[in-house]
Amino acid sequence: MTTPTTDLLPLLIVAMDHTVKYLLSLGAIRDRAKIVGQAAKEGNLNHFDVHEDKLDDVADFVTSVIKVCYTRLSMLLQGSFHRLA
C-alpha cells in the first residue's frame, strides 16, 4: 500500500538543499552525539544521566529495534522504488 507521501519521497529527497540533507545524515547524528556524549562525561546534562555500565545493554536493544524496523522499512522502500522504475 502506498500513499502520495511515500510515492513522492524519492523526489523530495532530491529536491532538498544541502543543509537539510546534512541534518538528515548519519554524519549529523554522529556530530550531535559527540557533543551530547562530551556533555554527559562532564555532567552537564539537564534532562538525563548517562550510565556507561549500561551502554552495552542499550546498544543491544537499539540494534534489535533497527533490525526489526529496517527489515520492514527495506521491504516498503523496495516496493516503492520498484514502482518508480
Image: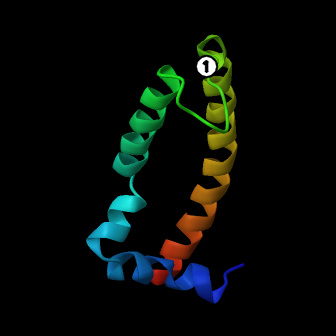
Q: Is residue 28 left or right of residue 58?
A: left
Q: Nearer the viewer, residue 59 or 82?
A: 59
Q: Amino acid at mark 1?
A: Leu
Where's residue 79, x and y in %? 58, 70
Q: Nearer the viewer, residue 43 or 7?
A: 43
Q: Nearer the viewer, residue 12 or 72?
A: 12
Instruction: Label 1, secondary structure: give it.
Output: helix
Point out the residue furthest to the top here. Answer: 53
Q: Is residue 51 left or right of residue 37?
A: right
Q: Is residue 69 left or right of residue 8?
A: right
Where's residue 44, x and y in %? 52, 30
Q: Nearer the viewer, residue 15 or 85?
A: 15
Point out the residue furthest to the left here. Answer: 18
Residue 85 appears in view: no
Pointer 1 local density, CA inside 10 Å: few below 14, some 14–19, many at least 20: few
Q: What's the residue at 33%, 60% (across, down)?
A: 22
Q: What's the residue at 66%, 25% (across, down)?
A: 58
Residue 51 appears in view: yes
Occupied quadrant, residue 20 = bottom left
Q: Quadrant of the N terminus?
A: bottom right
Question: In the rendered view, would you say 4 is above or below 83?
Answer: below
Question: In the rendered view, would you say 10 is above or below 25?
Answer: below
Where's residue 38, x and y in %? 42, 28
Q: What's the residue at 67%, 49% (across, down)?
A: 69
Q: What's the residue at 57%, 57% (across, down)?
A: 74
Check disc 1 and report the residue beneath it. 55
Question: In the rendered view, would you say 14 is above or below 42?
Answer: below
Where's residue 29, x and y in %? 43, 47
Q: Quadrant of the C terminus?
A: bottom left
